[in-house]
Amino acid sequence: MTNEIRLAFAHPSERSEASSTKVLDRISLRDHVVEVEIGAFQTERGTTQRICFNVVVEVKPASQTTDDVDRILSYDKVTDAISYELALERLNLLETLADRVAERILLEPQAVRVFVRIEKLDRGPGALGVEIVRDRQDIEQLVEPDAADKLHPRLVYLSNSAIASEHLNGWLDSLSASHVPAILCVGLPLETAPEVANSAVARRISLLAIEQNAWVLAARDSRCVVVASKTELDWSIKNGMISVWAPSKMVLDATHPPQAATSDGVGLAKWLAEILEVQDMVFVGEEFLEEIHSEGRVQAIEPSLLQSLK
């Protein structure tokens, strides 16, 4: 029991050695400290904290001695996996981060099993953390989607007049019949939102108001499903669904948030369009006809012409 307790707090390299059933080569990353915004508590938003990574990767032995860096799993692959996942989006849980880092490392063909320990260094008098073990059999899908197979949706921004249009349901019929998945975006409703001096609170109020408008749209047709996360959007795109974007989660969790104000629905929609690499953007409403010209992937149409878009 004493040895088990010691191993529970030992470096992942010792855990790896103690639990291996066959001899494998190992590479390790020790005490890699990064400052990042992470955490589920409100007090952890808007501020960074130090987190420490200790990672051990068990790898297939090289068939012969080689001094070619391209034929091994380099240390850079481990730190790159950490940097990639930290830059992708703001996360609440260390468990989620550890799982994603492990999966990304296991995308490397040489990797067999990975130990990931992550600790928060600033949340108390000691280090608070998690440790996970993953091997290739734990990962359902090890191959990233081919860029050529990626679906590029159409992003459609609806003005309030378009949401209320009598042509909406017929137009959604056309969208449903199309082979192009659609993401619907909306802006602030007509009702005036409460004004507050605190800028962080004002941002949340604006985002929640946009989401209320998204639910108003969803209430008009059951095919419009409100989604909040990138994962939900990706699933909807893959399955050819019609989604209505609720922006709060992605905007507040973004490591590179939109430059547009949270009250600027059009600006937020354009930010989402870049993230999703949409094939085109359509702005529906009379107010857009003067502001947005048919140029490249962008066009504007009147609500009365909703049925014309195929």
Image: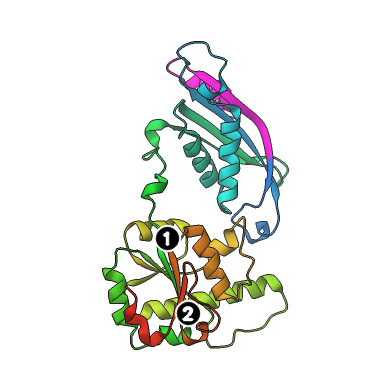
- The colour mode here is rainbow
Residue 237 % position (x, y):
37, 60
Q: From what the image shows, is residue 89 above or below residue 190?
A: above
Asked if one can make out residue 6 in the rendered structure from this viewpoint, the answer is no
Q: Nearer the viewer, residue 57 or 5?
A: 57
- Mark 1 lies on residue: 233
Could you tell whether 23 is left or right of 172 in the image? right
**Residue plotted at (41% across, 83% down):** 163
**Residue plotted at (67% across, 32% down):** 31
Asked if one can make out residue 304 in the rendered structure from this viewpoint, the answer is yes
| The furthest residue to the top | 65
Quarter occupied by residue 94: top right
Q: Is residue 8 magenta?
A: yes
Residue 3 % position (x, y):
56, 21
- Please state the extent of the stretch shown in magenta in the rendering: 7-33
Mark 2: which secondary structure?
helix
